[in-house]
Each structure stands twice: as structure tokens, then as C-alpha cells.
Image: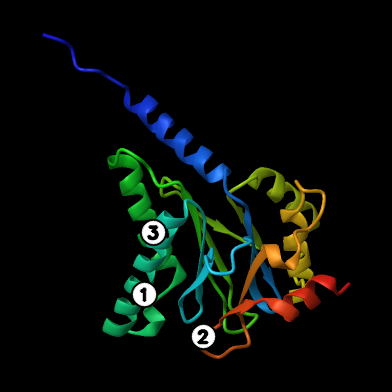
Amino acid sequence: MSMPFYVSPEQLMKDRADYARKGIARGRSLVALECTAGVVIVAENPSRTLFKISEIYDRIAFAGVGKYNEFQSLKIGGVRLADLKGYQYSPEDVTANSLANAYAQTLGQVFTHEMKPYEVEILVASVGATPEEPDELFHILYDGTVMDEEGYTVLGGQAEAVAEALAAEYQPGLDLGAAVRLGAKVLGADHDASPPADQLEVALLDRARPERAFRRIKGEELETLLSDS
């Protein structure tokens, strides 16, 4: 009688983590920064139709890096959860914190119990209605780990190098243009130049908008923000 093949739990978890990290590292990075206008999210993305950054609810945004179909399915699940909760209870009950915890549970369950983990990192961000209300940035890893970031966060790709460059230059109170230019600059750290406007996907959770805060920044507006000094 042959003995069953045995792998220790520690080795199994390590192999799954290595697999997920390698898949995520093959993608392009994404950064989110708090600024006076709200929360701006900047991603390397040459596609005009396949978005990494989306709206989940009135003042909450979702962003993902890694395997596109996997973070898209997570986004759709988050939109449905937010809509259902807002309808059953109240829109005020839909928070970035609760959505981040739901995502963490899903990713943790998949990482622990499924053969293949999700090759994704995701961001759930919300903007306060006034400068006194705190913005929130929840960075969720492939294994369900949640990090509550302040000021800025970096996802995917060459995250360590981008985060190091961002930490050296980020300052609280940046205006929108400065935040967009800084995001583009640090994403171009490995290319020796900032990506052009047509290689970037940029969105803003606009603090000044009374209800639906999410809007995309593209075309002439994006080119103007990138060229201003």
C-alpha cells in the first residue's frame, strides 16, 4: 500500500503565497494618494476599456492589480454587497471598512481552502465629505491581510521600489495636480520617465461632490494636470 503524498501546512502556505506574489509582480503598479481634493488613484494602464479603478458606492472606490478577471469578480461582488446593504439598511451603513473586511474574508477563505489563491491585491478607498473627516485607504493582500494606510499606498508590480520613491517625496496637503504628477513620476521610476497620459488611468474621489464622489480624469484634463508645474 503506497503512502499518501504529504506536504506540511507551513510549506503549503508558503508555496501559495509565492505563487500569488509572482503573479501580482508581473502586473503594473498602482498608487493612491490623499490630497486636498480628495483621494486620487493613479495606475499604469494602456487600455481604454479594461479598468483597474472603479466606483463601488457613493464615496467609495475600488482598485485592483494582478489577474484582471479575478479582481473584476471581486469588484462586482463588492458592488452587489454595497447596493444590497444600502437598500436594506441605509447608505450610511455602507462603509469602506465593512467592504474591506468582506473582501478580506473572501480572499482569506480562497487562500486557505482553494487549490489556487487569487493573484490580486486590491484597494478600497473612501473620501470624507469635509477636510475634517478622515479619508480611508484599505490595502488588502492576496491572503486576506488588511492594511489601513495613511497618506498613500502602493499596490502590485514593483511595489517596494515605487513605495520607496513615494515615501521620499509625498507630503500631506498636495493639490490635485501635484498628486497626479507625483503618482505618475513614481510609477515611472523603473522606466526613467513618467508614463504619458495615454498610458495612465487616473480617478479621483472628489471631496467637493455632494453624493457620488467618483470621477475619472482623462483626456485634456489629465494632460493639463501632468504638464502643470
Q: Quadrant of residue 166?
A: bottom right
On the image, numbered disc 1 is attached to which residue?
82
The span from disc 2 to disc 3 (Cα, nearest Å) is 22 Å
* Kind of residue at disc 3: Tyr
The span from disc 3 to disc 1 (Cα, nearest Å) is 12 Å
At which x and y percent is residue 210? 55, 91
Determine whether the residue tagged by mark 3 lies in a helix, strand or loop. helix
As displayed, is residue 200 above or below residue 154?
Answer: below
Determine whether the residue tagged by mark 1 lies in a helix, strand or loop. helix
Residue 175 seen: no
Q: Quadrant of residue 216?
A: bottom right
The span from disc 1 to disc 2 (Cα, nearest Å) is 14 Å
Q: Quadrant of residue 87?
A: bottom left
At which x and y percent is residue 17? 45, 36
Q: Earlier in the sequence, mark 1 or mark 2?
A: 1
At which x and y percent is residue 15? 42, 30
As displayed, is residue 73 above or below residue 38?
Answer: above
For residue 23, side relative to residue 162 (left or right): left
